[in-house]
């Protein structure tokens, strides 16, 4: 269960940051305090009673909160997975990928 809590917390943090939400503003949306959000994101607590609220606040389906398979992959596995898909992308898609990588 501890591994699940950590992965779920990391996924929630990623989605929160993707929407440019601070822990404070996210906590307000959920009627929680910032410390509770921090504990969830650090994997210290499992947000069982808040999962539906969290998914709604982040505008994602509940199942997306548990989509963290990529967190378990090594850097080499991620690179290989990306490289294997590149030849099948259209020119415009490749340009988007290029711009994303350049931003990083």
Image (cartoon, rainbow, N blue to C red):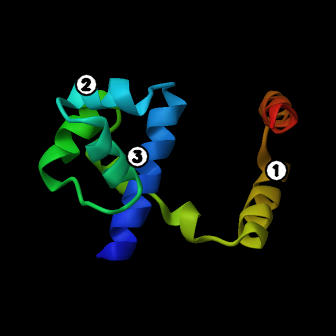
Picture quarter with the N terminus: bottom left
Q: If you read the primary sequence from the N terminus, does the residue marked by circle 1 or circle 2 appear first?
A: 2
SS at badge 1:
helix
Counting from the top left corner in percent of width and height, residue 49 is at 12, 49
SS at badge 2:
helix
Mark 2 = which residue? 28
Assess whether mark 2 and mark 1 are in contact (beta carbons under 8 angstroms).
Answer: no
Instruction: Identify the residue at image location x=50%, y=43%.
Output: 14
Counting from the top left corner in percent of width and height, residue 88 is at 79, 48
Packing grade of label 1 (10 A; few <14, some 14-19, many >=20) is few
Query: How many numbered circles does the render carry?
Result: 3
Packing grade of label 2 (10 A; few <14, some 14-19, many >=20) is few
Name the mark on residue 86.
1
Q: Is residue 13 left or right of residue 30?
A: right
Counting from the top left corner in percent of width and height, residue 91 is at 86, 32
Mark 3 = which residue? 12
Counting from the top left corner in percent of width and height, residue 19 is at 48, 26
Q: If you read the primary sequence from the N terminus, does the residue marked by circle 2 or circle 3 appear first?
A: 3
């Amino acid at each position: 269960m501890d591994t699940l809590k950590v992965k779920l917390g990391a996924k929630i943090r990623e989605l929160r940051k993707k929407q440019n939400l601070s822990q404070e503003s996210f906590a307000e949306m959920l009627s929680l305090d910032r410390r509770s959000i921090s504990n969830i994101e650090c994997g210290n607590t499992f947000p069982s009673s808040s999962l539906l609220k969290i998914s709604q606040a982040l505008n994602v389906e509940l199942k997306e909160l548990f989509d963290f398979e990529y967190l378990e992959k090594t850097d080499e596995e991620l690179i290989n997975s990306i490289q294997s898909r590149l030849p099948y992308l259209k020119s415009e898609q490749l340009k988007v990928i290029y711009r994303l990588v350049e931003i990083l």
